Amino acid sequence: MTIMSFWTLLIISAAISAGSSSRVLELSDRFLDVRKDGQWLVMFYAPWCGHCKRLEPVWAQAAQTLHNTNIRVGRVDCTRFTSVAAEFGISGFPTVLFLKGDESYVFKGDRTKEDIVDFALRLSGPPVQQLTKEESMKSIISSNPLFFVYVGEQEGPVWAVYSDVAENFQAQGFFYAVSPEIAKNYVNLKNTPSVFVFKENSFHFINDGASLDDVAYEDLNDTMHSWVNEERFTTFPKVTRGNIHQLLQTKKYLVLVVLQENKLHEIPAEMLEFRDMVESVIRMKRDKFHKWFQFGWVGNPELANSIAMTHLSLPYLLVVNSTTNHHHVPDDDPGRMTSEAVVLFLERIHNQSAPAYGGNSWPVRLYRTYFEMRTSLADMWHGNPVLTAVLFGLPLGFLSLICYSICCADIMDADEEEELGHEKKE
């Protein structure tokens, strides 16, 4: 046993004894000595952080799920072990990192057990995982709704580009390689090497299945990077503050169906009907809209309100230009739109005949900041008016007293000078 392994076991044993009821390891500043030993999934938190407290039960579930893997799950209290926070450049809480050797990867997805576990599992293995048995392919298809597959000899420019793309997007997607013999049981291979994506029980080839051998290396590199970036999301995902920035990186128009979920994540029937209608458009018109539009739905209207800088009626249809940050809204009441009206609306956006609002100009940014501050204050007031009055009333009261004292002092000083002046004249 090496010295480093000994210290690793010692630290893990101490962490387990400190909290034996949880699979989460409580790490200290000694973690810096063993951070490169093995693979670590670490949450950097502060005890006073509300977001950290909400993540705690999810983090415990993720640790339980990953218990039988070679991934160690831990957490660091950054208020106690500031040297650890400084070493990893932690600037916000909670921050989740996956550490593997000298590499570190920041988790940017939704803070759910499924997303956190998938993030760790993707990074724990090689960028491209080999599937050598048909049973493995069947298992992946049944358990994973979206993944990429390379078919052919693992040599040459196509394989080199695919490997590079897989390494760049490893934190966001699963990448596999199979032989043509296995792939032929699932897809109609026209050429090898070939690359396809499995998405929601359908297979879609890059370059529509045409040969990749004749494509120049630079063009192939750009094409595959763009294609993977566009295809790495499901057809109609739930959009949240955690994943919207990733969705905007597709450089497509982001079509958002704005709804309101209750605390049980249930959607009213009339809103559900509207969502299903919009989803049917992309599924029926995939060849027409998929290249230009990424669809999704929002269960919390606050996110859409922040984009539109107004309070939207529900249900609503909002389209965001991911390149310019302009947004488009339909002229008609979205709740009464038909599938034909949705198609016409998207066609107008694509040919740039639909009005655009918002953008990135300074006036728009200032107004968006003002709108979000006003919305936050209104939410605080409705949630707890007494606390809001105390938080903002006390500072305003102290400021008023200070101003009053300054003004009164000036007036009193002026009176004394005037009295002294009168005495000298007398």
Image (tube, helix red, strand yellow):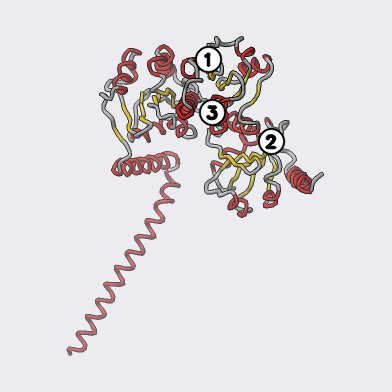
The residue where tag 3 is placed is 161
Q: Earlier in the sequence, mark 2 or mark 1?
A: 2
Q: Earlier in the sequence, mark 2 or mark 3?
A: 2
187 horizontally vs 426: left or right? right
3D distance between C-alphas at marks 2 and 3: 28 Å
- Residue 67 picture location, percent across and down: 71, 33
Quarter of the picture containing the N terminus is: top right
Q: Which residue is at 76% across, 47% downward?
A: 4
The residue where tag 2 is placed is 71
Mark 1 or 3: the one toward you:
3
Looking at the image, residue 384 lies above or below residue 303 = below
Mark 2 or 1: the one toward you:
1
Mark 1: which amino acid? Phe
3D distance between C-alphas at marks 2 and 1: 31 Å
Q: Using a 10 Å C-alpha cutoff, classify the residue at mark 2 as few (fewer than 14 neighbours), some (14 to 19) or many (20 or more).
A: some
334 horizontally vs 160: left or right? left
Mark 2: which amino acid? Ile
Mark 3: which amino acid? Val
3D distance between C-alphas at marks 1 and 3: 20 Å
The residue where tag 1 is placed is 203
Q: Judge by depth and name the residue closer to the eye, 60 or 355.
A: 355
